[in-house]
Image (tube, grey):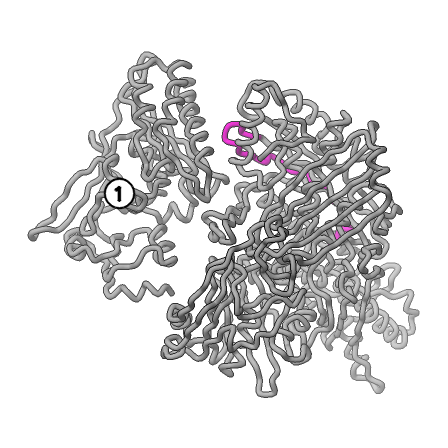
């Protein structure tokens, strides 16, 4: 990190560009990721996957595998603990029945991976295949095969929220759009594949090195799978190659590593190959969303209803819980007076979903933002005007009681529309839609709202922070905030440097050991800058007060006249240096009544628990983003080229500008892949494209030019006014492109991704219908 | 890493061709050059290693582009990157350079060899359609009765199925040769996939023909990913041969494309989309030639 000599004149770091402290090590290959770790005496664990979607295990014989030299343990569902874990206690480390392709049937610990793989090949399993359930509709049928004996009707989680009189609102609507959207399965594609290393000591305490992004509740969730007390688990988080929500739960490879370690008395590492990662790591929740939205002739929204069927997959992780956020979009994305939301998750024999950046909002915004565009078209309004007419302003409260204290939706709409010349281009492109020519240009606007100050879905959304200073004015922050690449390390460093006037490179963060760092609920819900930023700032301010009080006693100057800048105690008014900070700290430490700067803070945001009725101000802040996509469509091949994205986002206040840009750009890359190319092709429960050759991420050449606008609404509760921002960029881009596609071609896509084939087929069908003299209205939609 | 690696008992990296041919004379050698297809196939278990791993990269005279005479010769170990950068090929056969431009990624182009791309015999192999329209042949060498023997096989007879060619296990593909295109020769290549970079062709189409007085002659059209092998599109060729390049001829060629392409549904595209794209690309390359 470059040296930053803080001048003693007042100069804030807030809003500047600060590099991630670990960037040089990562860029030069010095970082040792968990995947690189080797412990003395460590064994390698490998898992035998079922490779079929639904079956009874008739016989399993591990004799030959056990006898192979170098094999230390072979476990199956019969001799593993068989203890249930997971949200619905429906999962187990090693299975006694097959419910999905990647069900873990047996596990081996051996001296080397080669031996472990050979041992897997020696395990004989006889299966009796069972009829499967591969769509939620099929799973909900009365005669559907039962996946879990104790979940009748294959029913998993159910959610409801109602507000107002739906029948009355429908009657008052001049126009209603009614569509079914089918957001698809995608997966996180972390560069570092899933990995865990487990080791027991002789007191029965488990140390687990893992990629988890929620170390404290992780202990609570892992313990039941092992039958031990959560207090007997120490979680260590080495550097990870991405998480994006995929490490927000316990997945079977983790208890498997621990069970193998227990059995062998040695450290055991389980690490997935890329193919295993594709098959056995969680997905984004696939859903079938039947959405209806109404408005009056003059463009005022009257109601929105959503009936959602979720493909639960074989087990319940975070995926089927996303309606908690889906319903906030349905009820809070623009001023919706009447809301009706229902969601039912149905067990299937498909891969199961975890949480994934955007958490339900990706799926619902895909629907709401397209229906906003359709309604604007049907009432013959510029979508920008339609959005502005229905946009909330600061101080409004949504039907679920989300309090939009500082709301910058209007500012975001105006900034993005003006920067992209939206209204003029939209009219121009729409007029050329049916003109001759192979290539069509389109522009599309979409927006969304997301929690930006945590989300109190656990009993606590808080964070503990310990801040200490040594005799050389070096600061160590011991924090619950995990670093999974999102850049909280840079934010914490920046805030400490801002408050204590020390150079950035004099700040060290300890945040990867649950025995050392205090509680945090985890990296999720776009919360960490907001929550850990507040915690860090409060701890730093406590330290600063202690230092200035000591300075007052030693220098005889009142604390309110003093400040910390450039590694010195200075006069607040003009920056005149009074004493070197490190000298003052030594004097404090070594005087007759010694004191050490060593403070703690526990910050709990002012938000309300989600609650069973879902009527609560569950986040301490909310934020909006508006994306405008400009595209060129090859109407023959169906290829969409994204020429430019203009993104305006309410960030509250910029803290680390470089980190913010990185989060928005990275979020857009994930969102673009979801929109255009990523798709898990699952055929009767079996993944057909478990490799990067056939699963298409967005790569650097496809990233469009970005024009980013950060709107600073100055959030009263946020650190320096900041809001959490990381999920919105992933959420908004897909419907912006879908709306641009409509603008360009008159075609609507309801089932992502908007792959060349999907687009070509839709355009082809529209032309066939046009030639036959009937053009589908957007409200009816086109079959794709 | 891979279990199949254990099948390898000998690793050879000869400097002379006859040494290599002798080492594979019993057909029990896996030939390694760039490894970009071989490594994923052996790693996944789709293809086992044979007992001998034969690295042909060091064999003298097996690489390089000889473009001085009437016959152009490209050695088997020539990388796709070398083809892409070749000023001589850009002059003589730009259609081949164009295909090399769209081949996978920079890293893969740097390693992948022309010989390997052909021997892999993928219906989607990007080097095949442009070489088919150049009328290329491959040279296959083997060791028999104490001497090296070489035969030439026209590329259009080389492929027999997905991953299968007429090359025998004891044979090594040593070079690709084609006659220097006559004056007036035009070539075009077009491929498509869901993403611009690092893409396997959903469909590819190449055209090679002489253009004189607005008419096409010696027409060759090739297609990739529409059948079990890269193929010559005989119906399209027939629709074009000797015809004036006008809208009627182009429409006839597009209609004929459906006769030549027999695509399937797979994870990359449906048969419908492939058939649709073939027609789009045939029209596109013909329009392009007509426009210039």
Q: Is residue B282 above or below residue A18?
A: above
Residue under the image location 38 percent in, 27 percent down? B258
The magenta stretch spans residue A653 = yes
Q: Is residue A440 left or right of residue B251?
A: right
Q: Is residue A694 left or right of residue A741?
A: left
Residue B90 image position (x, y, % from top left): 34, 32
Per the rendered image, the range of residues in magenta is: A633-655
Q: Is residue A532 visible?
A: yes
Q: Is residue A618 left or right of residue A322?
A: right
Q: How many marks?
A: 1
- The subunit letter for the residue under badge 1 reads B
Residue A475 image position (x, y, % from top left): 72, 71
Residue under the image location 60 percent in, 74 percent down? A83
Residue A212 image position (x, y, % from top left): 62, 66
Q: Residue under circle 1?
A: B64
| Closer to the camera in the image, A237 or B273 | B273
Residue A718 image position (x, y, % from top left): 81, 56
């Amino acid at each position: 990190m470059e040296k930053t000599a803080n001048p003693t004149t007042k100069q804030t770091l807030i809003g500047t560009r600060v590099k991630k402290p670990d960037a040089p090590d990562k860029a030069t290959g010095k970082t040792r990721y968990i995947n690189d770790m080797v412990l003395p005496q460590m064994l390698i664990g490998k898992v035998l996957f079922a490779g079929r979607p639904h079956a009874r295990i008739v016989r399993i014989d591990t004799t030959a595998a056990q006898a192979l030299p170098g094999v230390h343990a072979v476990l199956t569902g019969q001799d593993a603990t068989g203890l249930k874990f997971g949200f619905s206690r429906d999962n187990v480390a090693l299975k006694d029945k097959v419910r999905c392709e990647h069900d873990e049937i047996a596990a081996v610990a051996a001296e080397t991976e080669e031996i472990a793989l050979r041992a897997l090949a020696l395990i004989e399993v006889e299966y009796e295949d069972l009829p499967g359930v591969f769509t939620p509709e099929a799973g909900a049928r009365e005669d559907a095969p039962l996946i879990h004996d104790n979940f009748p009707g294959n029913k998993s989680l159910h959610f409801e929220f109602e507000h107002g009189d739906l029948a009355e609102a429908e009657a008052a609507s001049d126009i209603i759009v009614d569509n079914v959207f089918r957001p698809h399965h995608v997966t996180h594609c972390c560069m570092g594949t899933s990995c865990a290393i487990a080791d027991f000591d002789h007191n029965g305490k488990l140390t687990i090195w893992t990629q988890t992004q929620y170390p404290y509740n992780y202990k609570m969730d892992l313990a039941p799978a092992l039958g031990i007390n959560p207090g007997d688990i120490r979680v260590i988080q080495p550097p990870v190659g991405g998480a994006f929500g995929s490490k927000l739960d316990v997945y079977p490879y983790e208890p498997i590593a621990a069970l193998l370690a227990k059995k062998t008395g040695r450290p055991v590492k389980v690490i997935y190959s890329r193919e295993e990662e594709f098959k056995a790591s969680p997905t984004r929740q696939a859903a079938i969303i039947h959405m209806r939205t109404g408005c009056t002739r003059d463009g005022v929204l009257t109601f929105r209803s959503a009936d959602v069927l979720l493909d639960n997959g074989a087990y319940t992780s975070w995926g089927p819980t996303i309606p908690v956020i889906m319903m906030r979009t349905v009820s809070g994305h623009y001023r919706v007076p009447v809301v009706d939301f229902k969601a039912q998750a149905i067990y299937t024999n498909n891969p199961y979903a975890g949480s994934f950046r955007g958490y339900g909002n990706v799926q619902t915004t895909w629907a709401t933002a397209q229906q906003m565009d359709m309604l604007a078209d049907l009432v013959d309004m510029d979508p920008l005007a339609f959005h502005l007419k229905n946009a909330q302003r600061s101080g409004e409260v949504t039907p679920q009681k989300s309090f939009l204290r500082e709301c910058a939706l209007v500012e975001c709409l105006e900034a993005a529309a003006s920067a992209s010349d939206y209204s003029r281009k939209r009219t121009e492109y729409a007029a050329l839609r049916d003109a001759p020519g192979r290539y069509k240009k389109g522009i599309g606007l979409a927006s969304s709202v997301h929690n930006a100050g945590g989300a109190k879905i656990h009993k606590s959304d808080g964070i503990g922070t310990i801040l200490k200073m040594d005799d050389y004015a070096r600061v160590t922050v011991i924090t619950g905030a995990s670093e999974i690449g999102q850049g909280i390390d840079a934010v914490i460093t920046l805030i400490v440097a801002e408050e204590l006037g020390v150079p950035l490179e004099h700040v060290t963060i300890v945040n990867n050991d649950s025995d050392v760092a205090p509680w945090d609920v985890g990296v999720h819900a776009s919360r960490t800058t907001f929550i850990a930023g507040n915690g860090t700032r409060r701890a730093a301010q406590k330290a600063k007060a202690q230092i200035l009080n000591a300075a007052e006693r030693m220098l005889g100057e009142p604390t309110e006249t003093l400040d910390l800048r450039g590694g010195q105690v200075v006069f607040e008014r003009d920056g005149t240096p009074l004493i070197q900070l490190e000298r003052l700290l030594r004097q404090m430490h070594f005087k007759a009544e010694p004191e050490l700067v060593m403070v703690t803070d526990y910050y709990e945001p002012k938000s309300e628990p989600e609650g069973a009725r879902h009527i609560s101000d569950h986040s301490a802040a909310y934020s909006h983003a508006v994306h405008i996509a400009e595209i060129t469509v090859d109407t023959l091949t169906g290829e969409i080229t994204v020429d430019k994205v203009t993104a305006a986002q309410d960030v509250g206040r910029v803290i680390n500008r470089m980190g913010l840009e990185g989060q928005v750009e990275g979020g857009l890359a994930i969102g673009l892949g979801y929109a255009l190319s990523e798709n898990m092709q699952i055929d009767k429960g079996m993944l057909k494209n478990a490799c990067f050759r056939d699963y298409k991420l967005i790569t650097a050449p496809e990233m469009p030019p970005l024009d980013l606008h950060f709107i600073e609404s100055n959030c009263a509760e946020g650190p320096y006014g900041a809001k959490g921002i990381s999920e919105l960029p992933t959420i908004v881009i897909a419907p912006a492109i879908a709306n641009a596609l409509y603008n360009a071609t008159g075609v609507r896509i309801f089932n992502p991704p908007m792959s060349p084939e999907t687009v070509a087929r839709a355009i082809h069908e529209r032309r066939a219908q046009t030639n036959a003299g009937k053009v589908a209205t957007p409200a009816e939609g086109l079959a794709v | 890493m891979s279990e199949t690696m254990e099948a390898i008992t000998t690793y050879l990296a000869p400097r002379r061709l006859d040494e290599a041919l002798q080492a594979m004379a019993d057909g029990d050698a896996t030939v390694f050059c760039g490894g970009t297809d071989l490594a994923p196939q052996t790693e996944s278990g789709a293809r086992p290693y044979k007992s001998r791993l034969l690295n042909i990269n060091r064999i003298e005279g097996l690489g390089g582009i000889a473009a001085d005479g009437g016959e152009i010769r490209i050695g088997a170990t020539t990388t796709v990157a070398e083809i892409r950068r070749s000023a001589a090929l850009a002059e003589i056969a730009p259609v081949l350079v164009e295909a090399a431009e769209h081949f996978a990624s920079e890293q893969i182009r740097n390693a992948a060899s022309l010989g390997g791309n052909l021997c892999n015999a993928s219906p989607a192999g990007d080097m095949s359609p442009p070489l088919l329209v150049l009328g290329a042949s491959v040279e296959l060498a083997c060791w028999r009765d104490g001497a090296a023997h070489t035969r030439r096989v026209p590329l259009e007879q080389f492929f027999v199925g997905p991953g299968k060619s007429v090359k025998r296990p004891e044979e090594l593909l040593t070079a690709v040769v084609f006659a220097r295109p006559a004056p007036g020769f035009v070539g075009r290549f077009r491929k498509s996939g869901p993403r611009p970079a690092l893409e396997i062709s959903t469909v590819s189409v190449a055209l090679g023909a002489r253009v004189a007085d607005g008419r096409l002659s010696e027409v060759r059209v090739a297609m990739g990913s529409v059948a079990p092998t890269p193929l010559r599109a005989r119906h399209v060729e027939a629709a074009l041969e000797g015809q004036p390049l006008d809208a009627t001829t182009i429409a006839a060629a597009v209609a004929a494309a459906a006769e030549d392409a027999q695509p399937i549904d797979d994870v990359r595209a449906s048969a419908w989309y492939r058939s649709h794209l073939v027609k789009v690309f045939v029209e596109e390359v013909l329009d392009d030639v007509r426009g210039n």
